[in-house]
């Protein structure tokens, strides 16, 4: 069986590895900037689809389907991001006689519309925060906000990832921020509708991984704590959550299964909840109808390959996971090409040197290599480092060890920030909320020079590298005498 992966970077490489494990062939698609990307090198087949932006490459449905026909692929895996939650893409894939590795378009559509998803949850009796239906008029929003109460959150009806999201403390702010959020949502999702939701001041973001087949079997594969976020983007995730008790955990997993059944869901997905520690209650947020970036922590704890399960479901196989066990603790850190010393501004350029960590109970999902030029057009995620331990503290220390070993020259990364977070009192205790990033002070002297010594491939000579703060380039010296 030949599978086209409609994605790039580390997730494409990760999917290729499972395909190789099960004896399937992989097809990589690539844009012009990704011509020499790892997912292209690692694939069995690769085909260029042109363009240099997401809109002209990985988001172009026509190009993806053309590539599938051209290469003889029979299945398409969307990964995450890009077209992964576009019902119209799944419809076109099936219309062209191909198998879409993901949920049915109708259930994807229900999950993707946040307002409709809230209605389903309400019918099923799943706890919800006070909120409204979809709104496209700020005057109506002002009227409805009085019943919801301030502070509240403006959210996009048709999307997530922080787009179209604003915190509002009073009517004046609502009047100002509603049009801005609507324009942002329209630009990101093609839909400017918004809805209002009561704001929990110190919440935890907890999500449940589910997998369902075509025979009505839905399984909850444990929960993940995803409260560490910057600008609504996660940067460290862990499982199990250090904050919820066993009863809340079981209730949350049951609610996730009920919601998935309520929309006739199959394949992998994630049901997200907000947990209010002060009240000891959780509330339904939304469902992501795709594989999540942080799925490896679930794989570590269950011993399952979620991509393999996705493919099995897409091929019509029945899931048999009744004897599922959860073991140990797992933590994931996202390595992004961004400069934590300059307000996390994007970083691009050639990776001059790369050493990724290895060793006991460490997994690295990566889309880069030494010599690769990190483009400016896409998400800054370079790789993910995931640890496992019998205890949470063991997993934390192993992740610290791995991040200290991670060496990358040529682009800036958020590793210094991740190390400080993992060593912070709040993370060590597990008592952090989604407000962590706003409260955490990353006050560290900018390294004017970073020195690293390594063996080269040329005659065993040693090199010394200096990171130039201003240009973010690396000067390589073959011998110390050149200083």
Image (spheres, rainbow, N blue to C red):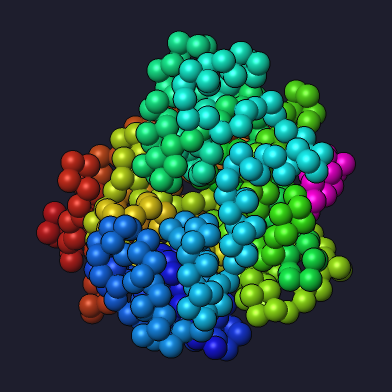
- Vertical position of residue 342 compared to residue 30: above or below: above
Total numbered circles: 0
Residue 340 percent location from the top left of the image: 37, 39
Secondary structure character of the magenta stretch overall: helix
- Vertical position of residue 280 compared to residue 356: above or below: above
Residue beneath the point at 53% across and 60% down: 87
- Vertical position of residue 51 compared to residue 24: above or below: above
Residue beneath the point at 38% across and 36% down: 184
Residue 476 percent location from the top left of the image: 19, 60
Residue beneath the point at 59% across and 42% down: 114
| Residue 172 shows in this picture | yes
Residue 11 percent location from the top left of the image: 48, 65
Choose top left, top right, bottom left or bottom right for residue 267.
bottom right
Residue 306 part of the magenta-drawn span: no
Image quarter of the C terminus: bottom left
- 99 displayed left or right of 299: left
Residue beneath the point at 62% across and 65% down: 104
- 62 displayed left or right of 327: left
- Vertical position of residue 463 compared to residue 473: above or below: below
Q: Which residues are magenta?
A: 244-258
Image quarter of the N terminus: bottom right
Choose top left, top right, bottom left or bottom right for residue 269.
bottom right
In the image as oriented, which residue stretches furthest toward the left?
A: 482
Choose top left, top right, bottom left or bottom right for residue 298.
bottom right
Residue 6 percent location from the top left of the image: 44, 69
| Residue 426 shows in this picture | no
In front of the other: 185 or 51: 185
């Amino acid at each position: 069986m030949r599978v086209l992966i409609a994605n790039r970077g580390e997730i494409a490489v990760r999917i290729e590895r499972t395909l190789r494990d099960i004896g399937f062939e992989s097809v990589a698609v690539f844009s012009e900037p990704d011509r020499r990307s790892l997912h292209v090198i690692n694939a069995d087949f690769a085909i260029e689809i042109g363009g240099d932006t997401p809109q002209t490459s990985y988001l172009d449905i026509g190009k993806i389907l053309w590539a599938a026909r051209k290469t003889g692929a029979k299945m398409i895996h969307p990964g995450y991001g890009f077209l992964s939650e576009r019902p119209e893409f799944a419809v076109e894939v099936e219309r062209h006689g191909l198998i879409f590795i993901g949920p049915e378009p109708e259930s994807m559509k229900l999950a993707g519309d946040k307002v409709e998803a809230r209605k389903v949850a309400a019918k099923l009796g799943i706890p919800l925060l006070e909120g409204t239906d979809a709104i496209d008029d700020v005057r109506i929003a002002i009227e409805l906000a009085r019943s919801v109460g301030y502070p509240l959150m403006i959210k996009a009806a048709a999307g997530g990832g922080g787009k179209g999201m604003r915190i509002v403390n009073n009517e004046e702010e609502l009047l100002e921020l509603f049009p801005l959020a609507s324009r942002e949502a329209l630009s990101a999702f093609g839909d400017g509708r918004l809805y209002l939701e009561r704001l929990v001041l110190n919440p935890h973001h907890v999500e449940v991984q589910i997998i369902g087949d075509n025979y009505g079997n839905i399984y909850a594969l444990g929960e993940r704590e995803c409260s560490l976020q910057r600008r609504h983007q996660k940067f460290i995730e862990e499982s199990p959550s250090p904050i919820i008790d066993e009863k809340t955990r079981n209730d949350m997993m049951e609610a996730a299964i009920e919601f998935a059944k309520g929309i006739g869901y199959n394949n992998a997905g994630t049901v997200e909840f907000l947990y209010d520690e002060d009240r000891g209650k959780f509330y339904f947020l939304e469902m992501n109808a795709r594989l999540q970036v942080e799925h490896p922590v679930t794989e570590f704890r269950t011993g399952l390959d979620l991509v393999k399960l996705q493919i099995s479901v897409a091929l019509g196989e029945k899931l048999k996971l009744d004897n599922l066990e959860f073991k140990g603790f797992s933590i994931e850190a996202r390595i992004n090409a961004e400069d934590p010393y300059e307000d996390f501004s994007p970083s691009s350029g050639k990776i001059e040197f790369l050493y990724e960590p290895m060793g006991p109970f460490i997994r690295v999902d990566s889309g880069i290599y030494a010599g690769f030029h990190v483009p400016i057009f896409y998400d800054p995620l370079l790789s993910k480092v995931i640890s496992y331990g019998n205890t949470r503290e063991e997993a934390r220390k192993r992740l610290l060890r791995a991040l200290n070993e991670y060496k990358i020259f040529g682009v800036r990364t958020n590793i210094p920030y991740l190390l400080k977070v993992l060593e912070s009192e709040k993370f060590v205790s597990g008592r952090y909320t989604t407000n962590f990033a706003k409260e955490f002070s990353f006050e560290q002297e900018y390294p004017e020079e970073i020195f690293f010594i390594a063996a080269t491939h040329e005659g065993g000579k040693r090199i010394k590298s200096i990171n130039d703060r201003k240009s973010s380039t690396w000067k390589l010296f073959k011998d110390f005498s050149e200083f």
